[in-house]
Amino acid sequence: MPEGIEVEIYRQAADPIVGHQITSVDCPDEWFLKEGATAEHVSDAVVGQRVETTRRIGKLMLVDLSNGVTVGLRFGMTGRLLVDDSGPIDELEYGPKATKDEWVRFRLSFDNKRQLFLHDPRRLGGVILDPDESKLGDDMFSITQERLQERVLVGTVALKARLLDQKRVAGIGNLICDETLWQSGIRPDRAANSLTPTEQSTLHTTLLQTVETLFKQGGSHTGELQSERHRAGHCPTDGTELSREKIGGRTTYYCDVHQK
């Protein structure tokens, strides 16, 4: 967390800055600036520029400026976007409930008196100028079945590891992945290239439906499986005790009975 759903919610919350000029930038934690950027460099690049649009690819939020510079915002596991000291998401699955001034890592101020903050207790996110968008795969909200087959359903790596690879499909995190595979009835430890044509179609349809449903419900943490994602949790479908393993480096919950 946050996953692509939360970042899209953040992006929409930033609508009030579009069309407005940046009057100042505050980088109290220069370590949070990535790829060699400094506070002075960022200030020179953004102050006085107008926000043309906001975009998102996967878990990366993008702010396009009038001089052609793009500011990339990454949120890590505990990053939240705040607009004027309040955010569209008050609490993240793996983050503290509190909001503290010392956890503000980046701030933009605008000519309409609005302010945009990146609040990150664990400092796992970052700010990047002109990020390389080509490193990210197709976005999870819109990936086609053909692209899913080409980019994800290849090789003998575990299916979950492929789905979490942001270079192949961007935006899927641990919660979305477990929910999608549980809903589709497919085991996360299956080889990525082992799915039948019917299973490939089911996975694609279920992924898009799951993302849309969780987005409408307000976050990746709102899935049907979520309340049972703990030790000795049980499958909401058939009551089987869920298996718990590390797959793709992430703690994974799935049902041995209906996920095949």
Image (cartoon, rainbow, N blue to C red):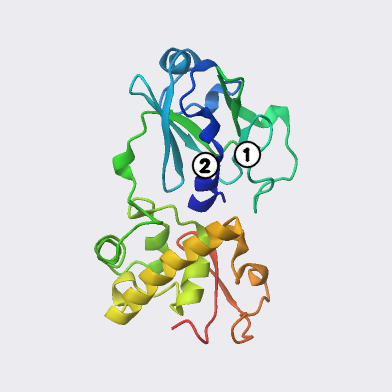
In what element is the residue under mark 1?
Answer: loop
The CA span between labels 1 and 2 is 24 Å
Whether the residues at callouts 1 and 2 have beta carbons within 8 Å, the answer is no
Q: Badge 2 local density, few (<14 within 10 Å), some, or many (20+)?
A: some
Q: Is residue 201 left or right of residue 220?
A: left
Establish if 254 lies above or below 26. below
Counting labels gives 2
Q: Nearer the viewer, residue 50 or 211?
A: 50
The residue labelled by disc 1 is 122
Residue type of the residue flagged with mark 2:
Gln
Residue drawn at (34%, 46%) of the image: 136
Confirm whether residue 75 shows in the render: no
Q: Is residue 158 left or right of residue 30?
A: left
Q: Nearer the viewer, residue 67 or 188?
A: 67
Residue type of the residue flagged with mark 1:
Arg
The residue labelled by disc 2 is 12
In the image, residue 185 lies at what x, y percent?
Answer: 46, 80
Q: Nearer the viewer, residue 43 or 84?
A: 84
In the image, residue 254 lies at what x, y percent?
Answer: 54, 75
Q: Quadrant of residue 69?
A: top left
Label 1 or label 2, whichever comes before in sequence order? 2
Residue drawn at (37%, 62%) of the image: 162
In the image, residue 58 lies at what x, y percent?
Answer: 42, 48
In the image, residue 179 lies at what x, y percent?
Answer: 52, 68
Q: Quadrant of residue 30?
A: top right
Name the mark nearer the viewer: 1 or 2.
2
Residue drawn at (49%, 56%) of the image: 173
Q: Is residue 163 left or right of residue 91?
A: left
In what element is the residue under mark 2?
Answer: helix
Q: Quadrant of residue 184?
A: bottom left
Confirm whether residue 35 shows in the render: yes
